[in-house]
Amino acid sequence: MISDSFRIAVVQANPRLGDIAGNVALARTCYRQAAEQNADLVLFSELFISGYPPEDLVLKPAFMKACKAALHELAAETAGEGPAMLIGVPWEQDHQRYNAVAYVDGGKVEALRFKVDLPNYGVFDEKRVFHTGPLPGPINFRGVRIGVPICEDAWGDEVCECLAETGAELLLVPNGSPYNRGKAEKRLQIMVQRVVETNLPLIYCNQLGGQDEVVFDGASFALNADRVLAMQMPQLDAAIGYVECTRTGDGTWKLDSADMKHLPERDEADWKACVMGLRDYVEKNGFKGVVLGLSGGIDSAICAAMAVDALGAERVHCVMLPYRYTSEESLADAKACAEALRVRYDIVPIAEPVEGFHSALAPMFEGSAPGITEENLQSRTRGTILMAISNKFGAMVVTTGNKSEMSVGYATLYGDMNGGYNPIKDLYKTEVYRLSAWRNTQRPSGCLGPEGEVIPRNIITKAPTAELREKQTDQDSLPEYDVLDDILTCLVEEEMSVDAIAARGHDVETIHRIENLLYIAEYKRRQAAPGVKVTQKNFGRDRRYPITNRFRDRTT
């Protein structure tokens, strides 16, 4: 039995969705490490045994059966005098499926708690696959009453209030909360509200790692009942934090910890999230490495830098695919970027296959003026060559379109949109420029690329161009990127009306044009590779617009 003090280990680790045996092995390793550090209780994140979010996998009986068996296997670790464990697991009971947390001690499952508030917004779709659990009471942990609200249960007040009223002495919150800008501060503010309402100390344990489009960023923390931060774990890095819990003279608990990390600023956090998302997508899906087209432009350069930071230079293959419109400047810039990153760099001219397409199509196209169709043949030839390299050598193609391009459809299906993953899919063009300049002066922790300038300055300062025709620049057909990106942020993230956007100083006809481009490009985005979620609303799980859509905002 606990007397007046005990120690909690908070595990911020990176499970792999569906790898039940691997997740059990990871949990076992963390548990044993915590036991060596004299922990009394080891706290894991939401659905750790299965990985999160498991989506329709939980509809598969064999999957649920395997998760239950894995929990009982892991429970054996707690036999004897070792610490107890709180760990997330999908659970089937009475023909219903729950997002559950298991309390394991003495070699067996002593208690289960089921998630009450199932999120059904943004990237979450839990009501589709899980049933709502009953309002919970506290768990008896060796004489201490522990409240365990699961993730969303602590974002509202009902579950925590119920736990406080039924005798909980502190709150332990296992989470699967994805990264987006400002999310760490928002989590802290919400948890402070729960502490104020319940007058209970709280420990927030968040998952780490990339899962398709979302990145879980950790940044776990602890709060005392007086709202003072007692522990702050790192963001976007694996760690185990330790919290000392001591009973005070009035019977309440005080939390103390030596773990107090500084959270990264916005640009560093965005960069690390993009790197982690790419790394985990490649590693968890079993690719040998990545290959990408290095054009001498800013988008491919930043993707190459992120790939090297994620995987190391030896696993990144860059290919320049020049045609008659490729400038000597672009050739020089691409080579300089590859040399700075120390990656393998090949040049594969595309004139012969492009001209072959022109020749094959000439009889059908006779009498029509050359235009976008011919330009897109260049992009599609490049995409085919990159996919062939991928097919031959087993490296995944990284696609390099930014959010500005993906918004307005300035990307070619089966061309530059070819690829398995896009680390900058949720970064607007202006953000790509800012992060590129930032990375030239910083190398964040955990990044494998070189220090110093990794993206040549000329790539950052020159006018952006697709180089599909003579003297082409992006601004031939688009507004300046600072204007375009502000309009897009208003339309996509904020869902603002045309009138409200115009009130910011933008031209109404320009807004109408961008809105129309945004809507008609939906069919392209549905076929695009997944990419890291960075903003509050990414293209994919966050934003689900119909492809067939005639609505346009004409309120002005």
Image (spheres, rainbow, N blue to C red):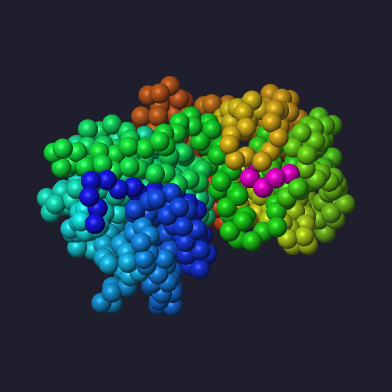
Note whether 147 is above or below 553 in the view shown.
below
Residue 311 lies in the magenta stretch = yes
Q: Residue at x 40, y 69 (%)?
A: 76
> Is residue 481 found left or right of 197 in the rendered image?
right
> Is residue 252 found left or right of 175 in the rendered image?
left
The answer to which image quadrant residue 271 occupies is top right
- Which quadrant would the C terminus be assigned to in this image? top left
Note whether 333 is above or below 310 in the view shown.
above
Q: Which residues are the magenta region? A: 309-313
Q: Which residue is at the front of the view, 238 or 504?
A: 238
Total marks drawn? 0
Q: Residue at x 23, y 46 (%)?
A: 4
Note whether 243 is above or below 41 in the view shown.
above
Q: Residue furthest top?
A: 505
Q: Position of residue 506 (x, y in %)?
A: 45, 25
Q: Position of residue 120 (x, y in %)?
A: 32, 55
Note whether 256 is above or below 393 in the view shown.
above
Residue 545 seen: no
> Is residue 271 found left or right of 154 in the rendered image?
right
Q: Residue at x 67, y 59 (%)?
A: 287
Q: Position of residue 434 (x, y in %)?
A: 58, 28
Q: Which residue is at the front of the view, 229 or 256?
A: 256
> Is residue 489 found left or right of 318 in the rendered image?
left
The answer to which image quadrant residue 73 occupies is bottom left
Q: Main secondary structure of the magenta part?
A: helix
- Which quadrant would the N terminus be assigned to in this image? bottom left
Q: Which residue is at the front of the view, 216 or 80?
A: 80
